[in-house]
Amino acid sequence: MVSQWGIKFAVHLITAHFGKIVANVAEKLLNNGPLTLELVTRYTELSNEHVKNSLLVLIQHNCVQAFTEAGDEDGSRVVKPKYLVLFDNIVHRLRFPKFMEIVSQELDDKCVTILKGLLRDGRLTLKQLVDMGQDKENAMAPDAVRESLCRLLRARYVERCPVPEAKIVEEKGDDKKGRSTSNKKARVFKVPEEHRVVEAAKRGDMIRFSLTAYTGCSSDGETKLADISVAENVAKEESFLWRANFEEFIRYLRDKALIENVRARMDDGAATVLSAILEATRNIDKNVKIEQSAPCTLDTISSEVMKTENGRTMTMDRVKAALVQLGCANQNIVDFKRIIHLARNEEVESIVLKRYGRDAYRMFRHLLKENQFRPTDQIAEATLVEKKEAPKLLFKLWRENYLQMEKLTVSMTSQNGTSPILMWKVNQPLLWEHVLDEMYHGALNLKLRMAFEEEKDEEILNISKKTRNESAPLQKKYERLRNVLLLLKSSLMKLDDALMLFHDF
């Protein structure tokens, strides 16, 4: 379930990239869930043509997926396609610069050019990629485009587009008879609808990450010379659409976050061993939100460790010690969920410290570790906070949804009455949802501020460099605007790292 600030942020991104009409359609889908064409038209109050074109734009840029649900077996019920907005893919548009940087580091400039075109235009055929490569000053030959696409496919940074219209079948349990309507509903919705639709639309890996034989790139990733010309190969590829694989980029960023968190909390040795495990199990652990790594032998881990510069200095005893640090159980399984939880807690602790001060931070951290209700006096004593100040700070954290409070009524026999005792606790799942919503709000504010600064000084941005150099006041204003925009962009990218930590990982 996407929060209201998350929806507003996604609508702002669509508005900035595609305009208000397309954003209107996206907003109705975000607020109402999957809708048929007729319902989208009714809710948006736009013409049928405008709605169709808007949906085509959103599908082209991987922000909407069409699907149909299974109808009656006898065909008596006509099933109309529905359109599901892909919230995650909309927010991923914020991360395009990060995706480009990953490919720049991992591959080369030619692959960056291909990826840039896919991120900008959404879905492209090989012919369109070739045409795009020839439009540049440093034009790429058709075979260079094909080879770069093959490299991106081998790295899984590009994939073949999913099926245009996914087929969703009702999930079935073990018993087929004697179920009530309520049980059937529970059976259908036990998996989130967005996840079900996305999975149903995916193609098998052999098709998803391979060019066909026509292009000379086999499914095992080796490039072969085709007997016919590249131009003929390209012509046969017009029906195949390719797009950036956001899933693999997010996985890369997740692995990087896991490694850096372990490096900060432990040491370089533990980070090196974790990196080796992630690399060794890369083709097994395909789900970004998987809770733990696949089993891995010590020899496999050691072999991967020795491939790195830091790993060559590590003895087997040091590798074993790092595995103990990582809390690996039998079969050297790493608990990703635990690392992510610790990272989230550290992020929230940092927010509390900056916003509410050190005393509130100490009490919050104490409750986070205890993970159960504690009375006010006990919290104050454990954290050395004055008893008069503790209730004020705890109430402040509670009002801002950082703490959960319950009143415990205790009988006072001597006074023949009752006295309430306030109990406090950190509810992690609810807290993380609240923090994520605040982050969407903050990201939206940063984007709005950037738009305001650019609009306010639009004339300065459009002035040529030669004219600016001839005028000291103009150059000074330009430098000031550039520094402001750089600061805002940097802040947004850092905030996005936290957004991924709480939502994507």
Image: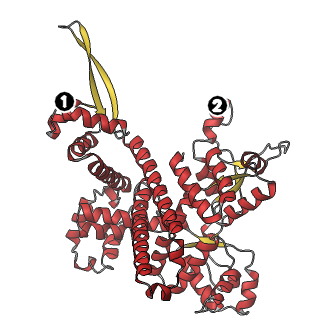
Q: Residue at x 20, y 69 (%)?
A: 317
Label 1: few (<14), some (14–19) or many (≥20) C-alpha neighbours in 10 Å: some
Residue 352 lies, in percent from the top left, at 29, 48
Label 2: few (<14), some (14–19) or many (≥20) C-alpha neighbours in 10 Å: few
Q: CA distance from mark 1 to mark 2?
A: 47 Å
Q: Is residue 474 above or below residue 352?
A: below
Question: Which SS class for mark 1?
Answer: helix
Find disc 1 in the rendering and name its residue: 377
Under mark 2, the amino acid is Ser
Q: Is residue 351 above or below residue 115?
A: above
Q: Is residue 287 visible?
A: no
Nearer to us of marks 1 and 2 is 1
Q: Residue at x 24, y 42 (%)?
A: 360
Comparing 170 with 85, the one in front is 85
Under mark 1, the amino acid is Asp
Question: Which SS class for mark 2?
Answer: helix
Find disc 2 in the rendering and name its residue: 182
Q: Is residue 468 above or below residue 169?
A: below
Residue 331 lies, in percent from the top left, at 34, 59
Residue 224 lies, in percent from the top left, at 62, 89
Quarter of the image containing the N terminus?
Answer: top right
Q: Is residue 107 visible?
A: yes
